[in-house]
Image: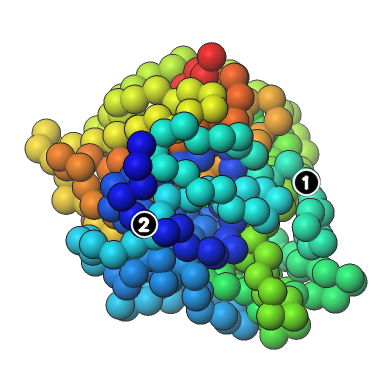
Amino acid sequence: MPDPLGPAPTEPKSDRAGFRLAAFGAIVVVVLFAGYGIGRLNNSVERAAATPTATTATGGGHGHDTAAVAPHDDTGAAPHVHNADGTVTQVNGAGNAAESVGGLAVTAAGLTLVPGATAFQAGRRQPFTFRILTAGVPVTTYAVMHDKPLHLVVVRRDLTGYQHLHPTMAPDGTWSIDLSLAAPGSYRAIADFTAIVGGKQTPVTLGVDLTVAGDYRPVALPAPVTRASVDGFTVSYAGQPQTGVAQPLLLTVSGPGGGPAALEPYLGAFGHLVVFREGDVGYVHVHPEPRLVDGAVKFWLAAPGPGRYRMFFDFAAGGVHTAAFTTVVR
Ligand SMILES: [Cu+2]
């Protein structure tokens, strides 16, 4: 399809991932977790993506940019996907190319995630700390993407227990957040960010295992569904991810009363879609088009390969909620 957005921005971010998203028509937005592209929907996404705010990070609280997120904005960047290796692939809605999945490595693109303690006790809140090193030196400057300098996603290897967190960074480059892992098992902690080193931006997604000792009871991946309930909301999706070609995926949220839920911007978009691959916990993170399409949140994504995936859709409506779906890509 033609790219209605004009020239693609040349921005470095990353969104790693496997599914690629392509935003199509208007502005796009992309990304969330680390690397993504958009810090705010309000200004030109393209501009936001191209000139992310450098920060020495404070993470933590929700330092949402107050100027952020206007639901309707006609400016924007061309759809693109942030690959795990730090490259950016421009996409035009369809015919996208290869995908890459993030989170599989603890070191990539010259950046290494060095965690503090990785052993947790079930159900107990404990600090999780880590640093991002380059040439042995902690990185202390990051680009703000989707309102945050770093996004941390944690999920158990059976794809249960999903959490999307925003750690805070100390001046020495140590990131920390209190983390509670509910049940025994092996978890994957994935940090999604764009490091700024020597003026160069490097988007990357790094992952590390966390463990919780105890009686591990793996949970089988739920059967594929297109409708899920969460916190009184009913979320359904239409579309089917495929390998190699970006497909539209429309998510519709109904409120407790059955009518359309009043979606609010969350981290610079009407929703964030984090997708994990069964078998290796490969991570893909995409962002929707900036505008709702017939009331639905519209993503474009292409699967990085056949397999079963668990999709987590974060949205805000009187608080942040997450709906989860299993989908099979052939
Ligand atoms: Cu985040």
Query: Residue 316, which numbered label?
Result: none
Which residue position holds label 2? 6
Q: Position of residue 233 (x, y in %)?
A: 24, 38
Q: Amino acid at mark 2?
A: Gly
Q: Amino acid at mark 1?
A: Ala
Q: Is residue 266 above or below residue 137?
A: above
Give the secondary structure at mark 2.
loop
Q: Position of residue 173 (x, y in %)?
A: 73, 77
Disc 1 CB within 8 Å of nearest ligand 1 atom: no
Which residue position holds label 1? 105
Q: Position of residue 101 (x, y in %)?
A: 64, 39
At 73% from the left and 42% from the top, the residue drawn is 104
Q: Is residue 282 above or below residue 154?
A: above
Q: CA distance from mark 1 to mark 2?
A: 34 Å
Instruction: Examine the rendering and report whether any part of residue 39 can be seen.
Output: no
Q: Position of residue 255 (x, y in %)?
A: 17, 40
Give the secondary structure at mark 1.
loop
